[in-house]
Amino acid sequence: MLIECEGLKTIRKYGLSTLTELPAWKNLQKHQRGAAQWRIRDLFAADTDRFERFSTEACGVFLDYSKNLIDEETINRLLDLATETDVEAWRERMFAGDVVNVTENRRALHTALRRETDKSLIIDDTDVMAGIDSVKTHMRDFSDAVRNGSWTGVTGKRITDIVCIGIGGSSLGPRMVTKALGPYADSSLKLHYVSTADGGMIGDALAKVPWQSTLFIVSSKTFTTGETSLNASTARDWMMQQSGGAEMIEKHFVATTADVDRAIEFGIPRENIFEMWDWVGGRFSLWSSVGLPITLAVGMDRFEELLAGARSMDDHFQSAPLNQNMPVILAMLGIWYINFFGIKAHAVFPYDHRLNRLPAYLQQIDMESHGKAVDRDGNTVDYDTAPVIWGKPGTNCQHSLLQKLHQGLDFVPADFMAAADPHTPMGDHHNVLLANFLAQTEALMMGNTENDIRTGLQDRGIDADEIEALLPHRVLPGNRPTNTLLFRRLDPFTMGALVALYEHKAFVQGIIWNINSFDQWGVELGKKLAGEMLADLDGDVPVDNHDPSTNGLINRLKEFRKP
Ligand code: F6P
């Protein structure tokens, strides 16, 4: 399934992963040859219990996975692979705080952040829960003070606007959750997210906020990320200009970081720094102090509900048998299509506009975690890893990208999700939304046959030649697999459970592929080159120290810049 290319040949010298030698892998390969001929609609016709057999519920989330190219044997064989790759033992290692991030010599303890604080977790002779508890108290005190108006800007004005500066994991999670939990938010606080180096982004935010009532949160685990440092400095300079001095910092700037010293060096007072730890991966950090924008928007009690939802998914993941374990099932269905059908993409369609940031969040979770071609032992893999994750909320997706899923040559497995109960009941809207939501997965599975189309066109009196000409264009092959997730309401608990579900799904896939899910070395080269490139962009003297294309582009930019 893996396309051979020069780059792979180069790294192949490090040895080959042995995953594809496992008996379960070979069995799945054999099994797939039969499954590739199946029609999902026929599987339903042959098994009246199929919906019950292939659906499960946990933590208020119901999963229907019956519209997949699977039978009972498929699931058993996939679970054999999970067993042969030691998923359960790795799961315990992660929860216990073992060093699962081997290339950075770190633990991945985001689950501790949502653990009950009175249940100790001893790491290196220290109870990490004490530190977590103390940061949570700090977050509560601070967000209460901002929300009740006792924390004010230097001029005594109540905070009205919060500019959240951070990128990647220091932005995607809080941005997704604050949007999702909009109905629970304090409407007198406006949140603005600034992430990229594009001056237009911070420029637009600063143009909107009154300095006297604006709070800046600088979120960066390392406190060295280029974009975040640049935006933080720009914000600080702007505030100094507006307020006439650096004294405003203690009332207008706070930081969330694992590097307290650097934040202090930047000028943020110690008491305005909300600590996190190197054992929280950036993309898994919304449960830590990185979630401060969430606590400011919806309050600490709601944040605790979010944590409780995630915790209940953690419990389910740790205790449910594999054949009823929702993260495991979703992960293995992904493995089935990626590794045995050669599918390179996975789509996510939330039928909830407040979940519009979910696809972007999942892109980081899946693609930064598993966009790798070397396994944990340094061997080159000869199987596909992270699919391309994409998606868009419904019903917008129906009017743009879903065409490809219905009639494209290859299929793209997709997750659809919706709440039974809307936060904003508006006449018939929710029923129309749900009707569209259900219609899509049905259409993707059932398709539209030649016979049905011919009959429909004949009924409309279209002449025979035209019908024959139209038929190939109008047939929808169907047999396109989907998962459907339903929940009662998109409340904080459900949101927490949903996000943890996808985190654990990604974790399981990382174990199957024997990949370290918690490092991201691939992003480093671009950062280094961008740093070096900066000097080359200065002035109007042409450069010749890069490859010909890059030289040409730099020199063309310099030409364009001339008056
Ligand atoms: O460049 C990738 C990355 O390291 C992500 O993994 C991380 O979430 C993001 O940058 C931001 O990093 P930091 O929180 O250290 O600023």
Image (cartoon, rainbow, N blue to C red):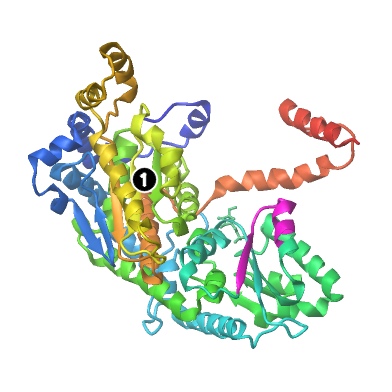
Q: For this view, does 405 lie left or right of residue 467?
A: right
Viewer-side residue, 471 vs 306 = 471
Residue visible at 37% across and 48% down in the picture: 514
Q: Residue at x 81, y 30 (%)?
A: 544
The amino acid beneath tag 1 is Trp
Front residue of this view, candidates 381 and 218: 218
State the image coordinates of residue 521 (x, y, percent, origin top left). Answer: 56, 48
Residue 3: x and y in percent read 43, 27
Taking the magenta stretch, the answer to whether it contains residue 190 is yes
Q: Nearer the viewer, residue 52 or 272?
A: 52
Q: Badge 1 local density, few (<14 within 10 Å), some, or many (20+)?
A: many
Q: Residue furthest top?
A: 465
When asked about the image quadrant of residue 396, the answer is top left
Can residue 385 be seen here? no
Where the N terminus falls, by quadrant? top left
Q: Which residue lies at the image location 87% right of the left edge and 75% below the top edge?
A: 244
Q: From the top left corner, tell me how far across and down residue 439 is, in percent.
A: 29, 44
Q: Is residue 266 left or right of residue 259?
A: right
Q: Which residues are magenta?
A: 189-205
Residue at 64% from the left image edge and 70% from the top image edge: 162
Task: Name the residue carrying label 1.
Answer: 513
In this orientation, does residue 328 appear?
yes
Residue 130 on the magenta span: no
Residue 123: name its quadrant. bottom left
